[in-house]
Amino acid sequence: MAVRGDIRTFKNAAWLGWQMEANWTDPFLFATYSIVKPIAGTLILVFMYLVITDGKTDTLFFSYMYVGNAFYMYVADVLFGVTWVIHDDREHYMTLKQVYIAPISFYMYIFGRAAIKIAITSIGVLLTLIFGVLVLGVDINFGAIDWPIFVLALILGLACICIMGLALGGISFLTAKHGQGINEGVAGIFFVLAGVIFPITILPGWAQSISRLLPITYWMEAVRRGLEPAVIAGLPGSTGLQDFSNLQLMLALLFSTVAFLFISHSIFKYADKVARRKGKIDWTSAY
Amino acid sequence: MSESWIIQNLRAVRGRAYPRILGAQREPSWIFFDVVLPLLGVAAYVYVYKFMNAPSEFVGFVILGGAMAAFWLNILWSMASQLYWEKETGNLSLYLIAPVSRLSILAGMAVGGLFFTTLRASSTLIIGIVVFNVTLSLSSPIMLIAVFTVTMIALYGMGMMFASLYLLFGREAYHLSSLMTEPIYLASGLYFPVKALGYWAAAGASIIPITLGLDGLRQLFYPSTSAEYGFLPVELELVILAGLSVLFLFLSKLSLDYMEKLGKTTGRLTLRWQ
């Protein structure tokens, strides 16, 4: 019965998330919004690259950077989405207290809202990859994709991002108006430390050690090995994880995800307890 | 326009700026969330340039861009969408019946936002300079202050204009702000010289004050790169920015009046959840 209730909560939360995301505009405008935002984010890097290389995009590093940046959208958007649920429901719609005291699993509610973010972000990621292959010559060979690794890495990685979002959601309970900064900042940690747009080997030694503790580092490497095996094989220099076999890489991703599950759960529970004690569940700042 | 009316409006500016300035002091956690963490995103762009063996000035370009990004985010999330959320929380009706100009309320929001965003941007700049060992030239400090000041007036004038327009967009406000993040980062050349977009694209993007402001600051901090990466002469950029300041302040008054008139006609100005 509990499982059925959880599924219903998840489904309704996802539906609510979809309504909040999409019912404000006509489908054409929404589609434009969904396309322009991710493409623009990617083009920032493309122009940075073009300025330095005088317009040369047919390099392995360009493909490496482009694919990493495309999949990073999941980190930025889904983390943002999960954390924003707390901030938005509490500060803007003032419905958090009603949801919180409702006889439902609050986790399922958050994950349901996150699911719709994943769906919308997936469209952006797909469009960015298509744009990269067709317009910029990003080196993705459809026939050479290692599907088992790619699909497994994608599923594990997305689960991991949602789990990390839970910890940030807990922290959002305790902070006023800083949801934006928390998301931007934590997404920034992964952007700089997880080998998203450059190999981690360029970072100082101490930073590389931190990189190896982050599941997103393994996720990025696994996604690239699945999607662009030729790029990873031919990239000059080391990615920092080249000594890992595919199996070791997936196990590292799995273990770090499980570790973050415990960490995130603990942070959320602690923040939840403090928020209750300090009366922050229905706290609004409005300055 | 009597003296007491001016004083009353100046008080309104101070009154609206006060909770923002005080709010920042009451919850100091923003120092970590808004200063330290965003620097990491900037660091990633620095490392991309380092990985590509870009000229050292590009590290400075990115740090400056990261600092200016704070102002743009403040415009979007704490200026443009603010009146909409004020309506949702019930404050807007209080502003409308207050015996002061609505512009004073918007100016107060701008002053308060500018205060802690300047702290955030300065911290990003200082930490970035120290961590990445960036060298900046201060050959024309007066010009530097002039460009920065005029950029801020134009930028916050734009924010004041958006605040009224956003009220008309209703629930689209959040999405509009979201939509204007990365595309504006791209168009204004936040992390690369805007000249790379091409002349006409860069000229079009110059309607966003941060584009010319940032280009001007980069040229002033790195005079040796002006010829290669500068979009327009700094003096010309200053004149255009001054023009944009007047334009946006004027448009903000117009849009505020229009919004108020429309609200009164339709009776929906303080109607929530629409």
Image (cartoon, coloured by chain):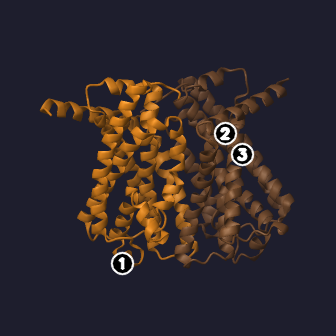
Q: Would you identify the image quadrant in which residue A47 lies?
A: bottom right
Whether label 1 touches label 2, CB < 8 Å: no
Label 1 packing within 10 angstroms: few (<14), some (14-19), many (20+): few
Residue at point 46% right, 74% down? Answer: B56
Residue at 39% from the left image edge and 26% from the top image edge? B265
Chain letter of disc 3 in the image: A
Chain depicted in orange = B
Say which quarter of the image contains residue B4: top left
Chain for disc number 1:
B
Residue A143 position, x and y percent, is 85, 68
Q: Nearer the viewer, mark 3 or mark 1?
A: 3
Residue A150 position, x and y percent, is 81, 59
Residue labelled with disc 2 = A166
Spot the brown chain and give its letter. Answer: A
Q: Which residue is mark 3?
A: A119
Viewer-side label of 1, 2: 1
Q: CA distance from mark 1 to mark 2?
A: 48 Å
Assign a secondary structure to mark 1.
Answer: helix
Task: Report crowding for label 2: few under 14, some 14 to 19, many 20 or more residues within 10 A (C-alpha).
Answer: many
Looking at the rendered structure, the secondary structure element under dot 3 is helix
Q: Which mark is residue B224?
A: 1
Q: Residues within 10 Å of mark 3 (few under 14, many from 20)?
A: few
- Residue type, label 2: Leu
Comes first in the chain, label 3 or label 2:
3
Q: Is residue A61 above or below residue B253?
A: below
Residue ranking furthest to the front: B265
Q: Amino acid at mark 3?
A: Ala
Instruction: Look at the image and tell me whether residue B92 can be seen.
Output: no
